[in-house]
Structure formats: structure tokens, C-alpha cells
Image (cartoon, rainbow, N blue to C red):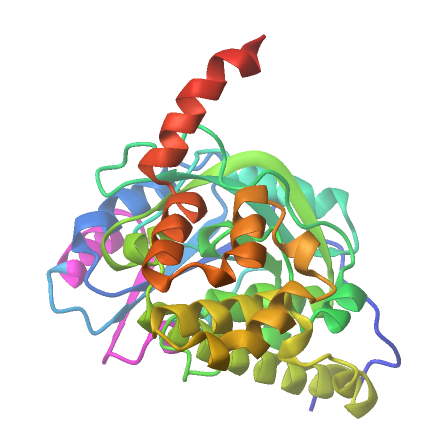
Amino acid sequence: MQELQTKLQPIKLSPLPNDPLVSVLIANYNYARYIGETLDSVLSQTYSNWEVIVCDDGSKDNSCEIIGSYTHKDSRIKLIPQQNGGVASALNIAYRHSNGEIVCVLDADDVWMSDKLQKVIAAFQSHSKGGFVIHDVFQIDGQGKLIKTTPMLKKLASGWMASSMLKNAGGIENMPPASALCIRREVANLIFPMNEAFTRNADSLIFRLAPFVTEIVPVSQVLSKYRLHGANLTSFTSITADILVRELETAKRVHQEQEQFLRKIYGGEVAESLTGVEANAWHYHDRYMLARFQGIPKSERREVHRLLVTHPQFDKAFRYKPLKWLLRWGENLPSPLFLALFAQISHESKLKRIARLILQPWAKK
């Protein structure tokens, strides 16, 4: 049984050996199109003391055949097939078969830069209290072409953030996606096995739990490419009522997992100090946008709009001025016009691309 910590503080980490074993966990489902390139990016690493555990989650394409060819090519790559159970289930199985002092997640459609592991290990070795290393990513499309020439994030989370997360309903900003998350074994042992009800978004459990027990070490370089295609591209570039319902439900379930995690590590007093989901302005953003998409009358959505725009975090959460203006003052606009404007200013739209082209010459002066 996990021994309770006496107070909210980073757990003690043992010194890393000079060449620690890195376990790379991959959950694959029907990614035959990409898994070869993903595994090639591990094979090309400048650091060689690694193992890859791929759990195939009941793929119906020829993924296992492709992965199997890599296991014959390099004994450091292992394939564990299972019946379809979802991402958390697959990662749990992969973790159960891993042995590394460092654990890295790699999505089956993403790609690592060749010096990724070398840079991650150096970051861990230079920060004795840091059990969670993150880095920036480039976004690529289904064909591997850059969507943007700039990194996904302008800055990365850093340091000991547990106290601020308690006050912010467990929320944390400036976190990259799964393939940029690396944790020490001591931290991973507290997180795994993950709740297998998370058939998707399992990486959210890692970056929403790890900061409660360890410091975050950011690496400024871009060390992986995050592929946007199909379903994840739709979720990333547009918002629908279905996506908002799913996001609200996921946020609620993650919050419950955080409370249980805190109770396990620190006990009831710390767990009960975690503020409710209402403490995060994005909760009201999603509720308000859902009301807009569902065509809820103004009289019925008035209260959630008030809670959004008067939220103490409103200005901090919505720094992009056009979006902030629309959320604050667009309540009187009819929903079709409001949603059309929202689509233009909140995502990579034609309007934003035109504005960038217009402003780019001035930015160089």
C-alpha cells in the first residue's frame, strides 16, 4: 500500500545511472499507415539504451504484421497484442512489461526527432527533483508536412505546480501532447495502472497527476512531431456539441481521478483542498459554448454566461483579445453569427491566415 506523504511536496527520486534504460510505451490501434515511421524514429535515436513495448489494441488492419517485422529487425522492440480495450488499457499492459528507469509515451502516429531521448535524459540528470520532463512539438498533417513552422506552444509548464493546480481544479496550462511526456519510474509507479475507463485521452491522466508528486522540467527544443489527421484533426480544428459534451465529461472524470490520486498519496485533507471543476474558467467556457451550439435560449443561458465573464480567471484564461471580446460581448448576437465568428477567431481559419499575411511584413520591421 502507498505510504502517505506528510505534506504536499515532490517525492524523492533515486540518482539515475549514466545510461538509464528508457521504456517507450506505444498503444496502437489501426495505425498501420503510420506505425512504421513511428518505430523508425525510435530506431534512429542517438541514444541506444531503450526498449519499445507496443501494445496493439485489437487492430483490424495489418498493424501487427508491420510491428512484427520490426520485432524481428530489433530485439529491443516488443509486440503485445490484446483485444480492443482502449488507450489506458493498452498503455497499462505496455507498462507492465517495461523495465526502464525512464518511461516515455509515444503515440503510434507521431514521430520523434533523433536526439529526443538524449535531450530528455540530460534534462532528468541535470534536475535531481524533476521526475517529469516535457518538450515542445511541431504539428504535422497526415502526409507528414508541417502545419505550422512554429512550435505548438509558446512556453512550457515548469517547476513545482501542485499548489497552483489545487487552486485551479487540477488544471494546468502549457502542456504538450502524449508523445512529449516522459516520467521517472518512481512517478510512473504512482500513476499506473491507469483507470481503463479512459479508452481515449489517457495521456491527460499522466500530465494531470504527475505534477502533484514531482517537479516539471521543460526542454525548450522541439523534439517530436504531433500528427493531426482524421478524428484528432477534427477535434483540434473545430468544436461541435458532441466534442464539448465529451470534453466536459472527460474533465469531470479526470478531476475525480485527481482527487483519488491525492487521497492515495497525501490523504483526505489535501484531496479535499482540490477545488471543484467550477474553479476553472474553461469549465464555464465549455458549458456556455455547448448552450450556444444547442440553441439554448438567451434567458436560459444567461447565468452560465455571467459565471463565465465574471470568473476570476477569465482574463488570464482568454488572453487572445478577439476571443475574449466575443465571449464577453457577443451574448446579444444570434447564435449562427456568434458561432461563425467563433469559428473564425478560435481556430486556424482563413481570416486568421489573411491577418497573419497582412501583419507579417510589419512584424519584420
Figure check: 42 above or below 168:
above
Work out whether residue 83 or residue 316 is closer to the camera in this orientation and state it: 316
Residue 117 in sight here: yes
Q: In the orientation shown, which residue stands out farthest toward the left?
A: 61
Q: Residue drawn at (40%, 56%), measured in percent from left and top?
A: 338
Q: In the orientation shown, which residue stands out farthest toward the top?
A: 365
Is residue 296 found left or right of 116 in the rendered image? left
Which quadrant is home to the C terminus?
top right
User: Where does residue 126 sit, x and y in percent of width and height?
Assistant: 75, 42
User: Where does residue 105 sit, x and y in percent of width and height?
Assistant: 46, 58
Figure check: 19 above or below 96:
above
Is residue 278 found left or right of 73 in the rendered image? right
Is residue 200 found left or right of 268 in the rendered image? left
Q: Does the magenta stretch include residue 115?
A: no
User: Where does residue 311 sit, x and y in percent of width and height?
Assistant: 69, 67
Q: In which quarter of the image is residue 55?
A: bottom left
Which quadrant is home to the N terminus?
bottom right
Q: Give the range drawn in magenta.
A: 63-89
User: Where does residue 301 sit, x and y in percent of width and height?
Assistant: 49, 77
Q: Quadrant of residue 18?
A: top right
Figure check: 189 above or below 107:
below
Residue 194 in sight here: no
Figure check: 223 above or below 332:
above
Q: In the orientation shown, which residue stands out farthest toward the right?
A: 6
Q: How many numbered discs, if any? A: 0
Work out whether residue 260 or residue 147 is closer to the camera in this orientation and state it: 147
